[in-house]
Amino acid sequence: MSTQPTGFKSWLLTTDHKKIGVMYLVTSLVFFVVGLLLAFIMRTEQLDITKKVIIDADLYNTAFTIHGAAMVLFWMIPVLLGFLANYMIPLMIGAHDVAFPRLNALSFWLYVGAGLIAVMALILPGRLDTGWTGYPPYSIVGPANTAFYVFAVHLLGASSIAGAVNFITTIITLRAPGMTWGRLNLTVWGLFGGFIIQLVGVPVLAAAVTLLLFDKYLGTSFYDGTKGGSPILYEHLFWFYAHPAVYVVALPVFGIVSDIISTFSRKRIYGYTSMAIAIMIITVVGFETWVHHLYVAGTLNWTRVVFMWGTIAIGVPTGIKTFNWLATLHKGSIDLKTPMLHALGFISLFTIGGVTGIANGLLGFDIQVHDTHWVVAHFHYVLAISMSMLCMGAIYYWFPKFTGKMYNEKLGKTAFWITLIGAMIAFLPQFHLGYDGIPRRYWKLPSQYAGEMRIAVIFSYITIAGFLMTLYNFVHSAIKGEKAPANPWNSLSLEWQIPSPPPFYNFEQIPTITDGPYEYGKPADTTVKAH
Amino acid sequence: MLKQMVRLLTAALFVSLPYAAAAAERVADPVKAWNNHFKTWAVVSIVVYLVVTVPLIYFVFKYKRRHKDETGAYIVGNTALEILWTIVPMIIIIMLGVQSWAVFNDLRDVPKDHIEVKAVGFMYGFEMYSPEGIKTINELRVPVGNVKVNLSSKDVIHDFALPAFRTREDMVPGENTYLWFSAKEPGEYPVYCAEYCGSGHSSMLAKVIVMKQEDYDAWVKKQKGEGTTVAALTPETKGKELVERLGCLGCHGIAGEIKAGPALNGVIGKSQELEDGTKVVIDEAFVKEKIADPKAKPVKGFGHIMPPNALAKEEYEAIAAYINTLK
Ligand code: HEM
Ligand SMILES: [Cu+2]
Ligand SMILES: [Cu+2]
């Protein structure tokens, strides 16, 4: 086997899936920090909800726009479909690399380019203030330079489509002998579902924003209701992708939670088949929900009813997964290491987001809380905070694998509890505002909520502090951590059966697989190690 | 075991169906219907949350790893159990869905006996039109009874949110939408713009004023009466009309109250500190410039969100004259 090239240039020109994975990780973490910084600024502005504290309405609008875009498009999706997919899929399915290594490098650099445009949209004149949703006519007649938005989405879209093609091909064609579909890690299943959604959805989003560009700069009127177009058309096209986009994040997260819980309970994941089926059901039904974002947009009444059933139906496969996790814990041998704490903390936050999300899906209920702080609270519990936290857990879990070093366990646990306690409280007051019908994206709010919002601010600070401690742990341990053993968790999963960090071509020989990744304590153990 | 389970669940489904059907019956008051719906949801949600978190915490303590080489029990699955936790959530969701559908119908089906009014959103305010054609800004007056509000917009998408009546709907340029509510008690009810529309979004506030029928009739009469004497408009009345029409009152109070911007009463002659620290004494020229180019001389302590308005010279003067009358 050839040796691993090193040095700065080897990173810039690399087509190695592991190096690309690490570059995705570092870049997405940078955007996470940008997002946190903007959250910090917005929350500080809410210290007094009746008058200006540090920023005016225009800056507040830009802050939530870039916060939302950075967090969803440049942090959550890339850390999962960029970092994790790159680093872990070849290791988990027993391959030397991805199917198209050079296309893979292109995906990464397109993502970096899109990121630079997003940063420009934050600081250059004509700052983006349209919300991450970019609805016309405001994005057309408003002051923002919508081209930033459109081009960032174009580059990111090209990156996502290339990535989806690459990884779907990899998973289908490069599985090692014996790595049947029934032996894939659930993480791989989740990523597979996520990539399918990207492939189907992203082109629609790209088309939607391109028409925006035409309307703004070329004088067409696709979205102009007074000239025969319709602004609602954009909302349909946007959410056709952007709602399933939350499943692009959620499905891999479900897979990771399953992997972590199984490893740290040393127990077979309960109901493997129903888990995989649930992932694929959500992949499909996820496209039957988007009109819930248009529940009060003047859409036909009966359309709203149809999409209510699609939306709340998602609760069933999601419920199945949660109960399977609980059943995996039952009679397990549970070790509360930092990654496991994050997985369990995730469940406790995600369930709050889940039940309040059903409320959003329920048509009659939602009319009162649509576009209110209820929604903001809901999606921070169900996705934003809970899944960011889980991503931290995933980074801890595979930290020994991709750095070859151990993280600091004590600091990891402390940071976890700080993040969790902060996150539990930080958004609760907003459910109350939402119940009272108070809209979101409000720079200033009715004065009777001042006290509650101050609680939200303080606990948000605590959450942010917790995340920053975790990030410090990563940086510090990557430089100074102790050397890690090849398989510190005693996991049966394939990626742990090779040295940490993995050698250049991962496997000296492509292994032959004879059993699944979760067969802990199987009578007459026949699990095959990679060698 | 499995058979019993399935039988039990089928029975549960049939028991729950009549309940769901009962929930679908039309309730007289949409607000009450919504409140009931919320309660049902809240009870179900708390139970679900406990069903997830209590076992989670219990298992973590009960099955804590005792020694290094311990392994969990080898359990592949249990079909009966898996069917149970598929079907129970299904039943819960169907029941909630049917109830929600009924609430939705209540909120959207306009009763036959209603009056129709119109609301038009603009950056940043609401123009309201009574059935008699009286136009008001950021203030919708209606008599007790059922009211249908026809909605549209002049520029971007806004939303007419009326939380006291558990209803809201977007105002879309080029399209016609509606909502309705049942005004029972005289009083004032806040209206918010709930669709993001730019700088003035969070100051795009209004109210619905429900009046007793006789008070409403008196109000209409008074408005109509004024309407006939407007023939010779003084600059001050014209200014008042402009200030209302242009949505200035969304951001400015006229009785000393501070909204997104400073109150307009008494500003002429007042000494004001600008963003760059200089002090100016506000005169009519300053007001004119402020309206035409608000960012030229930004006032300290506020967000700079005031939208520019290109008007005729007399119109600027009319506004300034009106503001001068506010003490
Ligand atoms: C401690 C961490 C965080 C805090 C304190 C925070 C706070 C906020 C606040 C105050 C808003 C604006 C609400 C409004 O006025 O409408 C917001 C919006 C948003 N946040 Fe976060 N957030 C955090 C983390 C995240 C994360 C990790 C994500 C990842 C997905 C995220 C996604 C969003 C999105 C998509 C929006 C909506 C933006 C829009 O309206 O266009 N947030 N957040
Ligand atoms: Cu959605
Ligand atoms: Cu608005």
Image (cartoon, coloured by chain):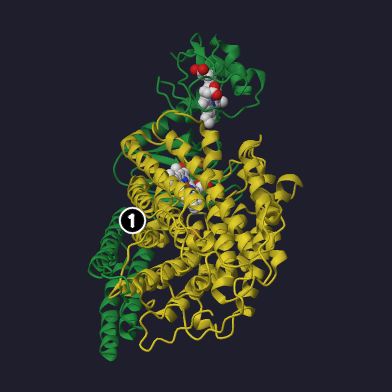
- Measured from the top left, where is residue A324 in percent x and y? 36, 74
Q: Relative to A423, does residue A182 appear above or below in the rendering?
A: below
State the hue of chain B. green
**Residue sitting at x 39%, y 31%:** A48
Percent across and percent down for residue B297 are 59, 18
Where residue A55 sits in the image (x, y, percent)?
50, 31
In the rendered image, which quarter is residue A265 located in? bottom left
Please state which of residues B64 and A139 is positioned toward the viewer in this rendering.
B64
Residue density around tag 1, few if under 14, some if 14–19, many if 20 or more, within 10 Å: many
| Disc 1 target residue | B30
Horizontally, residue A365 falls left or right of residue A145, namely: left
Residue at (53%, 40%) from the top-left corner? A63
Q: Nearer the viewer, residue A250 or A4?
A: A4
Q: Is residue A319 visible?
A: yes
Left or right: A271 in relation to A141: left
Q: Is residue A397 above or below residue B199?
A: below
Q: Among the chains, which one is yellow?
A: A
